[in-house]
Amino acid sequence: MAQLIAELLSNPAQSMVVTSLAIVTIYIIYQRYFHPLAQFPGPFLASVTDLWQVNQFLTFKQPYYLTALHERYGPFVRYGPDKISVTVEDAVPLLYQKGGRMFPKTEFYDAYGAAHPNVFGMRDEAKHSVRRRHMSHSFSMAYIKGMEVYLDQNIKLLKDNIATYCSSGQAFDLTQLLHFYVIDVLGELAFSQSFGVQETRDEGRIPPVKEHSLLSAATGAWPAMTFRLKRWLPMVPLKSLRALFQGRQACADLAAKCVERRLQDLQEARDDEVLAETQRKDILTNLILARHPDTGERLTKADLETEAFGFIIAGTHTTSATMSLLFYHFLHAPELMTQCIAEIDEKLPELQADQPAYPVATAESSLPFLRGCVKENFRITPVFTMPLARRVLDPAGISLGGRHVPGGTSVAICNHAFHHDPAVWGSDHNVFRPSRWEEKGTAERSRLLMHFGLGPRQCIGKTVATTNIYKVVSTLLKEFTFELADEQERKDVEQGLYRERIPSMDQLAYGDTELRLQQYKVLEGVCARSFQFLCIDGTVETTGVVTHARCPGAAHCGEVRSVGRGGGEKAVELTTSHQVKRSRDVVRSLNL
Ligand code: HEM
C-alpha cells in the first residue's frame, strides 16, 4: 500500500489528483458522518454542496421537491451542508415571531442586494426596524383606503379589457390581464403614476421581475460564492444568463427613473403652491420625506432607488400570481365558485354605474366564504416559496420539535412544505377545501400560515395585496362568469380529476404558460346564469337563474330564443326590441 501511494505521488500531476480526491473524500465523510447536522436526513448531494439547492431554484423544483423530501423524511430535512428545513409547528413562532434578533436572516438575502440592501434584504435588524418604521404608514389600511380611487380606476380598465374580449370572441389570458392590472396599481400606489400597461398593452412596460428573483435565489443559495458569482456571471457569454442580468438591470433602471421623476416633481412642487396641493403622498414620497428618528437624516438617493426596486420586485408577480391561482382553484372546483358568487349576490349590493368595484371596507368583511377561499389559496399554493432562512445565533443551539439544532445552523421553513404537512393540515392537504377553515383545529392554525412570512420580517405589503385581491375577485365574480376554455379540461374537472392536482409555479409564471380566458358568447341581449331583464318601457325587471329556454320575463319580453350552454343551464337571447341589463358577462377561462 505504502509503495502504491509513493508511486502515485511520484508524478506531480498524479499527486495533485490523488490529493484532491483524498480531500474530497475526507470532506464528504465529514459532512455525512461527523458534521453537527449529519443527524438530519436529506439528499446526499445537498449535504455536501449548496449547488444542490442552486439547481433546485434553476429548475423551478425547489418548493415541490422540498415538500416531497419532508413527506419522505419527516419534519427535518438537511437541504444544504449547513441548512435544515423544518415543518414542526413550534418552529413558526420561535424562528419568526418570538425569537427576534436571535434568528436574523442569513447570507442568502445578500444576493438580493448586499452592497445597498433594501428593507427586504437588510440583515442588520436595528437598521431594518428604522427603515420599516419609515414605511409602515404607507402600507396601512387607512392609507390604502385613501388611495382606493386609483384601485377603482384600474379595476375599471381591467373590466373593460375583459369585456373587449367578450365582444370580440377571442380567447385571452387572464393571468396576463391580472398582471397588467397589478403592475399599474403598484405604479399608482408607490410612484403616483400607473405604468400604463393596461391602457397600452405594451409588454415592454412590464418590469422583468422573474429574472432578478431567479438570479438572486440561485446565487443566494450558494453563499460562499454569491459575491464572486455576481461579479463573474455577467461575463459569461451565455444568452440565457445575459437575459437574466439584463432583466435585473431593466428593473433597476425603472426604479431609478421612478425615483428621479418623483424627486423632480416634489422639487417643482416646492416652488409652486398649486402643484404642491396636487402632490400625492405615495409610498415613495413618504420615504423621500422620512427622517431618521435619532439623526434626522433623510434617505439617500441610492436608498430610495433600492427600495423602489424592492417594491417593483416584491409587489407585482406575487399579487397577480395569487389572484390567478385563486381563479385556477375556482375553475377547477366550480361548485365553490358558485358558492362564492351566491354569497356576493346575497351580501353585496349591485354595483352602480359610477362604481367600478366593491370598496375595500366591505369586500373582505362581508364575504366569509370568499375569505375562506382566499385563505385556502394562500395555504395550498403560496407564491413566495423560498425557504425563509434564519441563522441560529446562540452557540448552544436551540431545541425544535424535541430535537437539538446546533448553533450556527441555517434553519428555514418553506411555506409550501409547511402548508402541505399532513401532520398539520390533514391527509387532504392537496385538496382546495375552504371549508377546512370552519373546523376548529384548523381555524386556530390559520395564525401559522406562512404565505406572507410572519413576525417583524413578514410582508409589509400584505394589506395592499389582500385588499386588492378581495376587491378584484369580488368585482369580477359579480360581473363575469368564468369558465374553462378547454372542453376536455372541463370534462376532467367534472369527473373530479383535478381534485388533488396543484398547479406548479413554473406553470403559473406569467409569460411561461398562458392561462387563457376565452369568451363564451356575449351578445347584446344574451344572459347567462344570473341576470336582470329591463324592458325598454322600463316596466319589467326580473332577476333569477335561467335553467331552460323559457325566460321568466318571457311574457313581457316576447320571443325568447335559446342559444344553449353547458352545465345544465341555458342562456337566452331576447328579441331586439328589448334590452337586457346584464349583471354578468360570460367568459370562458383558464387553460392551464
Ligand atoms: C400576495 C402577495 C404577496 C406575497 C405572497 C408576499 C410574500 C412575502 C413574504 C413571504 C415575505 C417575507 C420574506 C422573508 O421573510 O424573507 C415578504 C416580504 C416583503 N414583501 Fe411581500 N408579498 C406580497 C405582496 C407584496 C407587496 C404588494 C409589496 C409591496 C408593494 C410587498 C413588499 C414586501 C417587502 C418590502 C418585504 C420585506 C419586509 C421586511 O423584511 O420587513 N409584498 N413578502
Image (cartoon, rainbow, N blue to C red):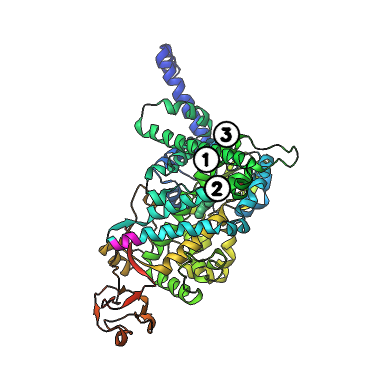
Q: Residue at image x 49%, y 74%? A: 349
> Between tags 3 and 1, which lies in front?
1
Q: Separation of disc 3 and disc 2 at Cα? A: 23 Å
Classify 10 Å Cα crowding around label 2: few (below 14), some (14-19), many (20 and above).
Answer: many
**2 or 1: tag closer to the N-terminus:** 2
Q: Position of residue 491 (x, y in %)?
A: 28, 67
Q: Which residue is mark 2?
A: 190
Classify 10 Å Cα crowding around label 1: few (below 14), some (14-19), many (20 and above).
Answer: many
Give the residue type at disc 3. Answer: Ala
Q: Is 222 or 578 nearer to us in this picture?
A: 578
Rendered-image quadrant of the N terminus: top left
Q: Quadrant of residue 539 in the image?
A: bottom left
Task: Report helix, strand or loop for mark 3.
Answer: loop
Q: Which residue of the protein is positioned furthest toward the bottom in this rendering?
A: 555
Q: Position of residue 273 (x, y in %)?
A: 64, 46
**3 or 1: tag closer to the N-terminus:** 3
Task: Report helix, strand or loop for mark 1.
Answer: helix
Rendered-image quadrant of the C terminus: bottom left
Magenta stretch secondary structure, dominant: helix
Q: Residue at image x 59%, y 60%? A: 145
Give the residue type at disc 1. Answer: Cys
Magenta extent? 163-167
Residue 493 is at least partly visible in this image: yes
Q: Which residue is mark 3?
A: 114
Classify 10 Å Cα crowding around label 3: few (below 14), some (14-19), many (20 and above).
Answer: some
Q: Which residue is mark 1?
A: 258
**3 or 2: tag closer to the N-terminus:** 3
